[in-house]
Structures are given as C-alpha cells and as structure tokens.
Image (tube, helix red, strand yellow):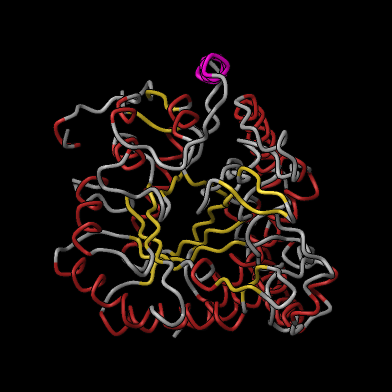
Amino acid sequence: MPMKDISWTKTSWRQFPAHQQPTWPNEAAVQKVLAELSHLPPLVFAGEIRSLKALLAKAVTGDAFLLQGGDCSENFSQVTAPKIREALRVLLQMAITLTYAGGVPVIKVGRIAGQFAKPRSSDTEQVGDLVLPSYRGDMVNRADPTMESRIPNPKRMLKGYNMAASTLNLLRAFTRGGFAALHRVQAWNQEFVSQSPMGRSYERLAKQVDQAIRFMETIGIPVDSPQITQAQLYTSHEALLLEYEESLTRIDSTTGDWYDCSAHMLWIGERTRQADGAHVHFLSGVLNPIGVKIGPSYDLDEIKRLADLLNPDNEPGRLTFITRLGKDAIEKVLPPLLREMKKEGRNIVWSCDPMHANTITAASGHKTRKFNDILSELTSFFETHWAEGTVPGGVHFELTGENVTECVGGARDIVDDDLNLNYQTSCDPRLNAEQSLEVAFQIAEMIRS
C-alpha cells in the first residue's frame, strides 16, 4: 500500500519493508525488552529538539554551520568519563576554530549517546577461517569472533539505553559544569596535539580568544553568561533499529506532537532510505530534525520524493541532506542535485560526509582513509556550492579524541606502516584529534573566503 495511504502511528512502520534489522532468536524476549524501554524516561526532550531545529534553520541560509561528528560505532566498553571527555574536547576545539577563525556560529551535534548499531553490506563476514554472522553494533551483538558472540541479544538494546543515558549525563555535566567554558580554550589542547603543527596553530587561536574574553571583562561586559561558561551539544545517531526507536518515541505533553526521544537528530543511512521503506515512513511522523545520507548512485526523482515525504511543509531545519559522494565523483554528481533542489525552492541543510565514500584497504589489510582524499571532497563540496549559488551548511565526520592511527596522512604524515601502532576502531577508520583539528582549520578558511 502506498505510504501516503497509511495513517502514521509509531507502529505503522511495521507495514513496510524494514532493511538491516536483526534476526532475533526469541521474539518473546524482544517484546519484554521493548515493553521495559517504552516505560523508561526519554533520553532527550522535545524542547531541546525544537531548539536544534531552529538552529539548523539558520544553517539553511548560511547564518550558522553544522558540525556533526563522533565515533563510527560507539562501543559499550568505551563509555567511560575519559573517553567521553576526549570526544567532547575535540568537538569543542573544532567548533571554536570554526567560530573564531571562520566567523560563523557553529551547531555542535555529536554522533554520540546512541550510535550503537551499524548497517552491514552482508549478513555474514569472514574472520580468519571462520564465516560468522556480521557484527551489527554493540546494541545487537558482540564483536568477538565467535558464533556465540554474534547471536543477536535484545537485552543489548536495554544496555544501549543505559549507556546512552550515562553518556548524556556526563555530557551535560561537562558542557554545563565548567569544562566547556571559553576560559578553558587553551586547556583543551591535548598533549599529543599541542606538540604538533596544528596544536601550535590552535594555541595561537586560543590565546586570541583568551585576550578577547579578558578585554570584554576589562570594559565591564559580563563574562559569566552561559554563552561564555557553557556549551550546547546535541546528540544524533542513525535511526537503524526501528523497534528501539519506536519504544523511545513519545508525545510531547505541551504540543501533542510525536518526537523520537532517543536523540535530538536522527539520520537515515544510504542502505535504508528507500522511499517506500520502513525507516522513511517511521521518521516521516516524528518532528526531530532528520538527516538523509546520499551516495553517488542516487536517483534524483527518489531524492525529491524523500524530500516530499520527510519535509512536506518545506520547514527550514527539518531536513539535512548528508552527501557522501567520494572525491572522484562529487564534481559530477553533486551539481544536478543542487540545481534541482534550488529550482524547487527546497529548504535543506547541505552537509558533506567526506569519509564514507573514500574508504580504501591498505596493504596491511586495514580499512583506512587518506586525509588528502577527505580534504579533496570537502574542497569540492564548498566550491560546487559556490558555483551553484547554494549554501554549504555543514560537515559530518567519523572522529575520535584519541591518538589513533586509522587514517593516513595529515600533519604527522601517518603512513600505511603506522596503522598498526594504534588502530582501535571496531568498524570504520576515524580521524584522530590532531587530524580533526587540522581539517577544522581548513574548513574555517573555506567558510571565511
């Protein structure tokens, strides 16, 4: 039945094809977990979601810029105060670089507090001599290369909720308890970053920010306002496990509207954005800001239909298109998309994911990405928008605050032989803190120009 002929409820997605869902071995156990989740408190609140949407509306016109980043796939074992603090730190460093050097307000959205599930290209994967069910993220199964670990366990959804709640609790403490205050911009510089060329550039910027704050204080402008002492970080993840998302979808008591309270912003992946699919139908009925990943083989008519389904009122801030096109394809495939959406007057936040379409396999067998390929796609993204008279509104990265060696290149010139030094990801390669800061300076230059 066509989607338009079905009235939306938070369970109506079940009437549509749902891709990338786990095959749970025990349906009774699933229902028990979902019943428990549906009675737990929301992780985020409708007022926060509306605030993010209002900020994203400014990114449509170029009056703000979206910075979205975090882990490819969060691991339960990494939900610790130091890991969360370092992830927040690198986003704060990138944001202050974009704000001060680029001269534009930055909307900070983490891939955090819920990015526990991952789509996979195959139901199985080979690990050594074993063919195992694919690892689908800690909310579904475990990464250990054993048959037992790969059995989907619905109780992991409940653990995912608890891990997300713990992460949000720490993020709110860090962002409102002094850690994110602009007085601390110099203290954010990690040791391994501060000793690098990018760290020294950041140190100069941090001193300028510090001087500006001291000048404000000297002439009597209050520097104890929330704008100086606090930061606002929003959360996001791919809305992949629809049963989990359904259980955390609630009616806002002040408006009577439906919101998915698992995160402030949710996105639909390249593998699940079928216009007649369950993911699109489900997210069409909640009022969160929605992202859609778009790869190079997109069909223009389908993208237009997605815009109709997900943002029928053309509301600014509701819809973000996250293009993941690859450095070799972007100059060819992005312009037709921009022209058509501009011609139709669509209000869209255009964001660039320069990571996913630039993944390669090193001689060592590690999945990796070249820093210069990432920069190349970013540069083409900005230049194409300028040429078409449209607004480059944001960027979307897989990154970490740790000193990992997963992407080659950058100021320290990580090479293939270095990947073994500190390759930690359980899924896709991420920029480390230094590489993240370096790319922020490059983006700031493009925004400023």
Q: Is residue 34 magenta?
A: yes
Judge left or right: residue 326 versus residue 4: right
State the residue in front, 369 or 183: 369
Judge left or right: residue 234 versus residue 288: right
Residue 150: x %, y % from top left: 67, 38
State the residue in front, 210 or 50: 50
Quadrant for residue 344, please give it: bottom left
Residue 26: x %, y % from top left: 56, 19
Is 366 rendered above or below residue 377?
Answer: above
State the residue in front, 390 or 426: 426
Residue 403: x %, y % from top left: 79, 66
Judge left or right: residue 35 versus residue 297: right
**Numbered disc total:** 0
Is 285 rendered above or below residue 356?
Answer: above
On the rendered image, what quadrant is the N terminus found in?
A: top left
For the stretch drawn in magenta, the main secondary structure is helix
State the residue in front, 391 or 322: 322
- Magenta-colored span: 27-38
On the rendered image, what quadrant is the C terminus found in?
A: bottom left
Residue, x 35% and y 61% (percent of image)?
Answer: 349
Residue, x 68% and y 76% (percent of image)?
Answer: 362
Residue, x 61% and y 55% (percent of image)?
Answer: 72
Q: Is residue 168 magenta?
A: no
Residue 278: x %, y % from top left: 33, 37
Is 80 rendered above or below residue 65?
Answer: above
Is 363 rendered above or below residue 174?
Answer: below
Residue lying farthest front?
Answer: 129
